[in-house]
């Protein structure tokens, strides 16, 4: 939150490349013939919280997934903390370990307890001692408010609790950046707040975050910058207040009028 | 019943051969089948193709043909092995194809989301398979694998055709002397049923133990 948003254009990438946490430069992504990300350039400063909005199919998830290379890009360059994403193998795995990701569908490991879900990667990927990983894991579970569920299995938790566990699992790796792809879309309405509250507190503590969400309340409360995507392009980006109250493009106005009347 | 008591020694030895073949081939096929399944779902095309070809080959050639081939062709190729071990090797490789398919059906119960989550956490492919995919697949595959193990036990009877003295072969020999086919083969059948029952019940127990809370 400490960071003031950059200029509301996509071209700030090159200028701030040296210090930014995530730098996407001229990224193109195709699925076969389908051009899904078009000339995407985006820089995210340390501790900045960027909310990505846009109509369905505009490429928000793909943008997120390209940042930790769950999807490979056709061309362009993506850097995390100054390092270009490695192609494959161990180096890529190490880099992914630094980028936390939270999915719409939680994706907890069904055969492991909640605490094991949180400690597995620190132990196996980071080589942490089991005892240390468990201590840190319990702290994180406590922090997201589900310490009492440490020994439960994912299926025994509500959706909101599962998503908070998934956030704790990502945090256990002490990531440099956290990616959220519609983290509350699969939740019953009464559970949305408990997850958003955790995310707001993360943002307040200075986590660098990329959040795809339709929760405009969250964007207003926690975002430094809103990025609006349409048809694979970043059409417009601005502070939440400016974006919601004075959208510049016709497409953003159309999008906002649609979601605000819901 | 006297006929069984009189030849109890050879019959028990033959039953022992059947059980040992089933157990060794069972363990072997679990190991080989797991490796084949891992290759089958790996992202490396060559491995995937090889595993696919393996499964297709063994599923589409009758076990008896394989046994006869191994027994007659291997010595020609200079590989000399006693009959029982040859049979065990063939059984292992053959049933491994079915084990691999059973595990693969279990893999489909592991959501793609969990695989993505483990990649996103920085697990290597090997870690994703061994820590996330296979443990869950194996649990979901316990019952199907139990059925493969039962089929494997029944299939040990084919060893009789290539001269291994196991239960069916021993029963046959006894019948040549006693000429009581209905009695003798009914008894042999009951013993096979008992073995199948033991395997089935064990699979059920294991499944209840390792079941994933869903
Ligand atoms: N694996 C894939 N293979 C082929 N096409 C894909 C794949 N994933 C996404 N797409 C296509 O890429 C485009 C962008 O998809 P993406 O999921 O990034 O959109 P989104 O903005 O996240 O949409 P939503 O709000 O519905 O989640 C869509 O047209 C989609 O059909
Ligand atoms: Mg999406």
Image: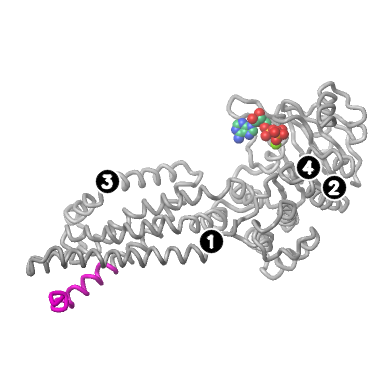
Chain letter of the residue beneath label 1 in the structure image = B
Asked if one can make out residue A56 in the rendered structure from this viewpoint, the answer is yes
> Of B73 and A217, which appears nearest the observer?
A217
Q: Please tell me in which quadrant of the rendered image residue A161 appears.
A: bottom right
Q: Which residue is mark 1?
A: B211
- Specify the segment rendered in magenta: B1-19
Question: Up-down: is A39 above or below B179?
Answer: above
Magenta includes B12? yes
Callouts 1 and 2 close, C-beta under 8 Å: no
**Mark number, residue B61:** 3
> Of B51 and A92, which appears nearest the observer?
B51
Image coords of residue A258 (percent x, y): 81, 27
Asked if one can make out residue A76 in the rendered structure from this viewpoint, the answer is no
Chain letter of the residue beneath label 3 in the structure image = B
Q: Which residue is mark 2?
A: A47
Colour setting: one colour
**Mark number, residue A124:** none
Please give the name of the residue rendered at 59% of the width and 59% of the height, measured from the top-left corner.
Answer: B213
Q: Which residue is mark 4?
A: A210
Question: Up-down: is A220 above or below A152?
Answer: above
């Amino acid at each position: 939150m400490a960071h003031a948003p950059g200029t509301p254009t996509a071209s700030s990438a090159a200028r701030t490349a040296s210090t930014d946490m995530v730098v996407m430069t001229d990224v193109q992504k195709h699925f076969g013939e389908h051009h899904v990300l078009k000339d995407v350039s985006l820089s995210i400063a340390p501790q900045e919280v960027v909310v990505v909005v846009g109509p369905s199919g505009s490429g928000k998830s793909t943008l997120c997934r390209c940042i930790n290379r769950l999807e490979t890009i056709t061309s362009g360059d993506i850097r995390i903390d100054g390092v270009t994403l490695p192609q494959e193998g161990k180096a890529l795995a190490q880099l992914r370990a630094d980028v936390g990701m939270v999915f719409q569908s939680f994706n907890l490991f069904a055969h492991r307890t909640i605490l094991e879900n949180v400690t597995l990667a620190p132990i196996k990927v980071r080589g942490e001692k089991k005892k240390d990983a468990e201590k840190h894991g319990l702290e994180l579970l406590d922090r997201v408010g589900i310490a009492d569920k440490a020994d439960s299995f994912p299926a025994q938790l509500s959706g909101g609790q599962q998503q908070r566990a998934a956030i704790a699992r990502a945090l256990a790796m002490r990531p440099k950046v956290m990616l959220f792809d519609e983290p509350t879309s699969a939740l019953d309405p009464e559970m949305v707040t408990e997850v958003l509250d955790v995310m707001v507190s993360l943002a307040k503590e200075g986590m660098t975050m990329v959040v795809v969400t339709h929760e405009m309340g969250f964007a207003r409360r926690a975002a430094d910058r809103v990025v609006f995507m349409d048809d694979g392009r970043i059409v417009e980006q601005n502070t939440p207040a400016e974006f919601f109250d004075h959208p510049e493009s016709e497409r953003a106005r159309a999008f906002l009028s649609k979601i605000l009347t819901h | 019943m006297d006929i069984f008591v009189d030849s109890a020694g050879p019959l028990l030895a033959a039953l022992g051969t059947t059980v040992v073949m089933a157990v060794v081939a069972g363990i072997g096929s679990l190991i080989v089948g797991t490796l084949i399944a891992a290759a089958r779902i790996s992202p490396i095309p060559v491995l995937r193709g090889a595993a696919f070809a393996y499964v297709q080959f063994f599923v589409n050639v009758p076990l008896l043909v394989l046994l006869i081939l191994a027994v007659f062709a291997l010595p020609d190729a200079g590989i000399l092995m006693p009959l029982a071990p040859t049979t065990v090797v063939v059984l292992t490789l053959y049933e491994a194809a079915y084990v691999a398919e059973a595990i693969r059906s279990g893999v489909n119960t592991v959501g793609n989301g969990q695989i993505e989550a483990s990649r996103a956490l920085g697990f290597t492919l090997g870690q994703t398979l061994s820590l996330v995919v296979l443990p869950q697949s194996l649990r979901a595959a316990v019952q199907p694998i139990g059925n493969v193990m039962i089929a494997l036990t029944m299939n040990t009877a084919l060893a009789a055709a290539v001269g291994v003295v196991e239960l069916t072969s021993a029963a046959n020999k006894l019948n040549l002397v006693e000429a009581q086919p209905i009695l003798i083969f009914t008894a042999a059948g009951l013993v096979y049923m008992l073995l199948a029952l033991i395997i089935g019940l064990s699979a059920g127990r294991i499944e209840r133990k390792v079941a994933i809370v869903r």
